[in-house]
Image (spheres, helix red, strand yellow):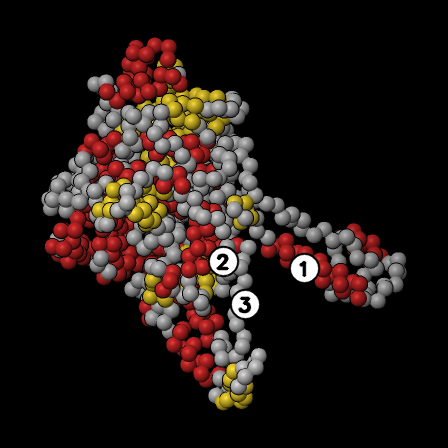
Amino acid sequence: MAITRIIAEGPGAGVLLTNTNRFDDLVNLARKNSIHYLLFGLACCGIELMQTGGPRADLDRFAAVYRASPRQADLMIVAGTLSYKMAERTRLLYDQMAEPKYVLAMGSCANCGGLFQCSYAVVKGVDKIIPVDVYVPGCPPRPEALTEGLMRIQDIMMSERWWREKRRPQSGAK
Amino acid sequence: MAEPVERQVLRRLTPSDEEIVINFGPQHPSTHGVIDFVTQTNGEIIRRSIPDIGYLHRGLEKIGEAVGYPGYMPFTDRIDYLAAMLANEGYAMAVERLLKLEVPPRAKYLRAIAGELCRISSHWVAVGSMAADIGASTPLTHALREREAINDLLEELCGARLTFNYARIGGVSFDAPEGWREKVLRYLDHLDSYIQEWDRLISLNEIYVKRLAKVAVISREKAIAYGLCGPNLRASGISWDTRRDLAYGAYPEFKFDVPVGEGKMGVKGDCWDRYAVRVLEMLESSKIIRQALAKLPEGEIMAKVARKPKPEAGEAIGRVESARGEMCYYVVSDGSENAYRVRVRTGSFMAMGIIEEMSQGLMIADLIALIASFDIVAPEIDR
Amino acid sequence: MNAQEIHAKLKAQFGDAVGDLAEAKIDPFVTVKADKIVEVCRFARGEAGLDFDYCEDVTGIDWPARNLIEIVYHLFSLQNRHQLVLKVETERSQPSVLSVQGVWKAANWLEREVYDMLGVNFVGHPDLRRILLPDDWIGHPLRKDYQEAGGYHGVTNTRFDPLVRLTQKVEEERKAIAAAAPPPVVAPTTATTTATATTTVPATAPATVPAPAPVPAPAKKEEPRG
């Protein structure tokens, strides 16, 4: 990491850093190994989420623990079918999470409405409400599949660069 | 974004100056699914708690009118995902009554074995998550470990871990593979000895008993008036079990006891009784599976059924003793290949009706214990 | 007691208000007049010998062909182990039935669900409001003529079909290739007739194909699934 330029005053005042990759890697390494996911089990996938956190396919070996409150979580695993009644609460929960936050859509129902395409009360995919980073297919996905999804989130985390001026675009989904 | 609409519920609550109205849920680790309990509390003591359901309403009854009789089977898995084998069986029984089909004996036995394994698996989640709601986090891990063993057995049988889609109209879909019977027996030996360890660790644990005994006592009359069923009804002292009293399938051939709440640790019909009935039922299921495996007849596993069955116009009821109570499928047919109406009446829905009355005067932690002792799953309530 | 005996007892007490025992396939039912349903239920519950203390289910069926909605009551007796199915018919335009929640408390939530799904008004119910759907939902889904509103609070109820998208993409690519290629020399050969006869466009040699025959794309229209 090197300091290339210092602008003392004026509209672009600040310090410009270069060669910050190792620094980013260190920060991201810490972040990806301590993911706190929101316990958002809605339906059957919620049980597989529990089993994935259980003794055999342990999510805790990634140091990923569940939190009940969205204020303390940085990953939201939407596990199950989203109904219209629940959709507003989901948006509220997503808004309550602090940046940087990620969403993993687990199972067919969260990806696209799943088995319930002809149902009147099911939102056809959670990405109509919130932006999704990783989609894990399955009905329900095996614990191994969900673990793979978590590792993809970790890859996303590792690829982020914080010390440049790029920011993740915040798109509201509709 | 519009304000979540709970005005109709709030109109029924009249908090005084010292009381507040809080929402338990819909996203809450202890509500066993997405259910909202709008609670008016005075500090820790609840004045009234009104459940607001429907957050997992997926229109399963309307879907039944569109997908055909065999096509509805995967949806019955999702009605009660913890005891999916039993839910499958109930729907299959209702449609078989409409079609006047006779199921081959081997299929009946396989349905009973799979159903009882599923019941044990569901009760593990029930007692494990009940312990977690009370505050002990390790028992849930033990319960999930036991459940993984049963998941492996059922995965060998039918290929799926959670939503099995195993029963078919007229029989079952897959036969028991080679060596499966020995694996099941080995697991049952482990289960019978492990339950004793579980009892020592949790059921008879002083803290656990103090948290659950004499809490939310449901009397006999109230249980019947509110339509409770299954372990909730049996814990209040009523000895009713559809497997024994309205015997269906292969159950007439098995000998088993029906555990009933006795008020051993407190009062008959309290939370501890509802918990204890489930643990004892696991042992009874183990007995049933052993008898079924010993007597398993040879033969085919499916009766002859048309690809798209068209029963004649009429209606039929299929009752099955699910892990959460009696699941009653009421199927109305109008002669076409789609059902005219599929109605599923589940035990968890009936259990919700009693919460408003029982919650008055409970502490917040006791409300959690009450909800956990009913062993509800959200899709059974909302369908 | 079997169905005939129960029906005989009800008929003896209530006469005309109780219809005949309909031997519908497998499970028989009794139709009761709408204004007497509470009394029949109270009698069924209290009468020694009947003792229907357990209300198993209250549900509704919409029959637009017969222009009525049927409310079905499944009653059960735990001590005598017999069951009874009562039906009440009400008109479709303004369905209204007396509430039996005073007889069995279990009927409270069950009737709320029938109101939510079918729009039946239960007279005398203390708390008749929607139970499964949001409070401001429009329509009653289990009616046969239910139309979805196309979304709720701004969330639409359709999703693009990936196969349709893929077909469109392939179509566009093919059009682009055909437009970019040099104008073909139309030589009336036997290959033309065979090509048009089979109505397929061999993708490997676009220059030799005389004219792109109309490709019957798998016409999978994207319909709002409702």
- C4 sits left or right of B311 in the view: left
Labels 3 and 1 share a subunit: no
- Identify the residue under disc 3: A169
Marks 3 and 1 close (CB-CB < 8 Å): no
Q: Position of residue A17 (x, y in %)?
A: 51, 85
Q: Please state the horizontal and vertical placement of residue A33, each as a whole percent of the image.
A: 37, 73
Asked if labels 3 and 2 touch by Cβ distance under 8 angstroms, the answer is no
Q: Image quadrant of residue C19?
A: top left
Query: Which chain's residue wears label 2?
Result: A
Q: Is residue C219 left or right of residue B295?
A: right
Crowd tier of the residue under label 3, counting other residues whose Cα lies within 10 Å: few below 14, some 14–19, many 20 or above: few
Q: Secondary structure at mark 1?
A: helix
Q: Is residue A38 visible?
A: no
- Placement of C101 over or under B195, stated as above or below: above
Secondary structure, mark 2, is: loop
- Disc 3 marks a residue whose amino acid type is Pro
Q: Secondary structure at mark 3?
A: loop
Which quadrant would the C terminus of chain C be assigned to in this image?
top right
Q: Position of residue C172 (x, y in %)?
A: 72, 60
Whole-Å distance between the Cαs marked 2 and 1? 27 Å
For residue A130, the mark is 2
Residue at label 1? C169
What separation in Å lies between label 2 and label 3 (alpha carbons)? 13 Å
Q: Residue B143: x and y, percent?
A: 25, 57
Which chain is indicated by disc 1?
A: C
